[in-house]
Image (cartoon, rainbow, N blue to C red):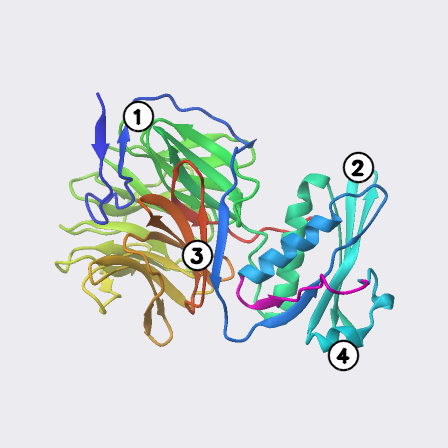
Amino acid sequence: MNKTVTMQHFKNGLIHFLSHTIGAGVLLWMFALPAQAALELEISGGSAIQIPVAILPMAESGAASSGSRLHEIISNDLRGSGMFRIINTSGMPALPTSASQIKYTDWTALKAQGLSLGEVQQVGGNLKVSVQVMDVLRQTALLQLTYTVSPSQYRHVAHLIADQIYEKFTGQPGAFSTRIAYVTKVGKRFTLQIADYDGFNAQTLVSSNEPIISPAWSPDGSKMAYVSFEKKKPIVFVQSLYTGERKVVANFKGNNSAPAWAPDGSKLAVVLTYGANSQIYTISADGSNLQQVTKSSSIDTEPAFSPDGQSIYFSSDRGGRPQIYKVPASGGSASRVTFEGSYNVSPRFSPDGKYLTYIRNDGGSFKVAVQDLGTGDVKVLSTGSQDESPSFAPNSRTIMYATRVGGKGTLATVTVDGLVRQRLSEAGGDIREPAWGPAQAAPK
């Protein structure tokens, strides 16, 4: 017999429920299988001052066939950040493929500050990608990059190059080479997907006829914690992204939900109705050493560790209305964090510790807000009415969140200054519960 689970922002400690009808089903594993459809990306807005750069097609040798695509990916990354203006080179009579061929007067006339060019070589079964990024005004090299990778990694290399260009010109790390996790629902089927930040190279980690919610990356990016209803109740699993092996880490009496990793990866905060109402506990990463953190007669839920690991921030209605509080990670007295607005939930920290994002009830609409922890200033960033699940990029500049457009669940991003917005959608289904993964090591 089917049952309906309605998504509510604050009830029984399970804030991330989806509004869907749930049917009986068997969990299927499809680790590392490509998804059929990539997310579609739409970009709007931009910073008031954009850096003009030219990203040229790369020369190809030795039967290499990805060079022409690399520069398109790099251009899309930089354009989507809102920080760069990509110069149109279609009218240029000839494009240089090496630094010695550059006529700098041509590029200064186009007001270019940077110029990227390079070569892709086929070396055995691999691709050797060599890139130079030139300072047009000084006529000197800013970056010289070389990667040797398998052909399947060409998109990742393009993202890495975009990261380097972004950092060189802005002074901030890029986040183009990172991955995201999210949950899709097509028909009665739920899947937990992992993809590049732009929705390409999507893979299904787990699929079920029962809901999957609250994905959370381990700090080193090697594991995923999530909640599955496959046993007809919420249970917290941790799964290796390399082997597919998974382990139940929280299956106590009542509900088990909202996993959040400590910064060192040694433990998780979880929400349990172990006694009566929802309270916050910590457990070791293997599910041992259960410790209660909050003790109240109210609903305490949605934990998030501070970047130093010393505190846990959480949502609670202990003051009468849902607000964000913090408590020492070892337990103790809680103190209120949010005071602006009558409803604030779903706290998440920026990795650099400068910002706290959360969902705020803004005139009856649920929107993404960000609080500058240095000044206390709060800014509402999103424009939807049912926004939820905010998650910071590892460079702390962009927030991804779930929203609804035309009655359909989709993902969106917004920069912390609110100037640049992107929307990622998938044809044929709802997409929810985003989690932005940590920075990844570059291939040698």
How packed mark 3 is, by other alpha carbons closer than 10 Å (few <14, some 14-19, many 20 or more), is many
- Which residue shows up at 26% across the image and 48% down it? 280
Of badges 4 and 2, nearer the viewer stands 4
Q: Are marks 1 and 3 in contact (CB under 8 Å)?
A: no
Residue behind mark 3: 413
For the N terminus, give its image quadrant.
Answer: top left
Check disc 2 and report its element: helix, strand or loop. Answer: loop
Q: Which mark is residue 231?
A: 1
Is residue 305 found left or right of 75 in the rendered image? left
- Which residue shows up at 66% across the image and 66% down it? 87
Magenta stretch, residue numbers = 81-94
Q: Earlier in the sequence, mark 4 or mark 2?
A: 2
Check disc 1 and report its element: helix, strand or loop. Answer: loop
- Which residue shows up at 67% across the image and 57% down it? 161
> What amino acid type should be assigned to the residue bearing mark 3?
Thr
- Pick the residue in front: 60 or 89: 89
* 114 to 17, vertically: above or below: below
Task: State yes or no: residue 86 in magenta.
Answer: yes
Residue 433, percent from left and from top: 37, 45
For marks 1 and 4, give the CA distance.
Answer: 64 Å
Q: Earlier in the sequence, mark 2 or mark 1?
A: 2
Residue behind mark 2: 125
